[in-house]
Amino acid sequence: MKKDFIFTSESVTEGHPDKLCDQISDAIVDHFLQQDPYSRIIAECAVSTAVVFIAARFASFASVDTPMVARNVINQVGYEEESFNSKTCSILTSLREMPLRRQDRFDENTLADEDIDDIRVENAATLFGFACGQTPALMPMPIWLAHRLARRLTSARLQKVLPALAPDGKVQVGVEYKDFSPYRIHSITVLASQKLPAEDEKKFASGIIEAVIGPVFQEEAIRPDHKTEIFINPQGPFVTGGPSVHSGLTGRKVGVDTYGEYSRQSGAALSGKDPLRVDRVGVYAARYAAKNIVAAGLARECEIQLSYSIGRSEPASIQVETFGSGRIHDDDILAAVKRHFDFRLAAILRQFSLRRMPSMVKGGFYRKLASYGHMGRMDLGLPWEITDKAGVLREYMSQHA
C-alpha cells in the first residue's frame, strides 16, 4: 500500500433522496419498536417526482401508519416545493404482516449465557468495523470532514443563514496523506441545491465558503491552504434538487453510512431493519471492537471482520487486520478481541439495548442514524462509540508486548 496518496469521501445532507428514503425506513422501524420492542420489521423506500413507495413486512403487536410516518419525515426534512412535498405526494405501500414467532419474542436482558447461544442468526453476512487515529472520533478524516460540512450545510439552511438553500446537498472532501497520515486538504466540493434560480452564483458560492466551510475548519488542525481546490456547484446552478431531480432508494449510501470507502464495508443496507438483523447490528459490534483497539493504543488502524452463517449464534470467523500498525502481533490482538468482546447476536442486543433505544431516545433512535453516518457520531452518545474496553485491552497489551 502506498504511504503517500489522496483520498476523497462524500457525505450528503438529510434532504438527499437516498437519505430521505433511509430516514423514512428507519422512522418506521422506530415507530414499531417504540410500541413493541420485540417487533420484526423490514422497511424499504423509494422516492421520485411526487411519489413515495414503501415496501415493508413485519410481525408485531404495533400499529403504525406508515404513510403518515413518511409524510412527517418529508415535512421535517423541509421539502415544500410543488413538485415534491409532504401534502401532495402520492404514497404507495406494499405491506405484509407476518405471523408472530415465539423465538423472536425473548428478553435478552434475562437470558443466561447458554440461552444466548440459542438465539441464532437467520441471514448470512460478512461485516466490517474500522477505526483509526486520524480524528477525535477515531474515524478516517475525509468522511469525518465531509459529514461535518454536510451537517453545517443543513444548519445554514435551517437557521436561514443561507435562505436560498434547498434540502438536497452533497459534499466531497479530498485529503492528501503523507506516510499514512493526513497532511493537507487537497479539495472540497459542495453541490448545494438552491430554491432561487436567479440567485447570483458568485454570491451563493461565497456564502457557502463563509457560512459552511470556514466555520467547520476553524476547529480542525488541518485546514484548507492556498493550494486547496474549492468547488461550489461546479456544473452550474443546482436548482431545487431532491426527488424531482433524481430518485432515491433505501440503503444506497452504505459508504456514507460507514467509513466513506476508506476501509471495507459490508454490502448490505443498514437502515430499515430491526435489531435482530445481524447484517445491521453486527456492523455496530465490529466498529465497537475496532474503536476500542485503537483507543487502547494497540494499533494505529484496525479492521475487524465478522463472518456469520445462518443457524449460528456467533460468527463463524473473526479476523483482525492492523495494516502493519499494530504494537503487538495481529494474532495477539485477535486473542484479546475474542476474550473481551461478545459477538453473539443476543449479546449485541443486550449490550447496546438496541431493541429499546427507540423508546429511550426522544424523537426515536434509528432515524437519527440515517443521516450523517452510523459511525463516529459523537453527538448521539452511541453505545458502540464508547471506549470502555480500552483499559483492559491496554492491560492485555502490557502482558503480551
Image (cartoon, rainbow, N blue to C red):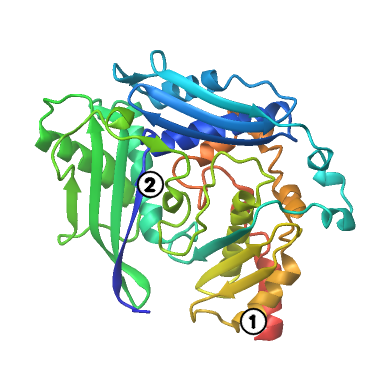
The residue shown at (10%, 31%) is 200
Where is the N terminus found, in terms of image quarters? Answer: bottom left
Q: In the visual, does 102 lie left or right of 142?
A: right
Q: Relative to 290, does residue 332 appear above or below in the rendering? A: below
Checking the image for residue 148, the label placed there is 2
**Which amino acid type is shown beneath numbered disc 1?**
Asp
Q: Which residue is mark 1?
A: 331
The residue shown at (43%, 65%) is 134
Q: Earlier in the sequence, mark 2 or mark 1?
A: 2
The answer to whether residue 168 shows anywhere in this view is: yes
Q: Relative to 47, does residue 219 appear above or below in the rendering? A: below
Labels 2, 1: front one? 1
Checking the image for residue 381, the label placed there is none
Where's residue 301, x and y in %?
A: 50, 71
Toward the viewer: 61 or 30? 61
Residue 249 appears in which quarter of the rendering?
top left
The residue shown at (76%, 31%) is 99
Where's residue 185, x and y in %?
A: 26, 61
The residue tagged with tag 2: helix, strand or loop? Answer: helix
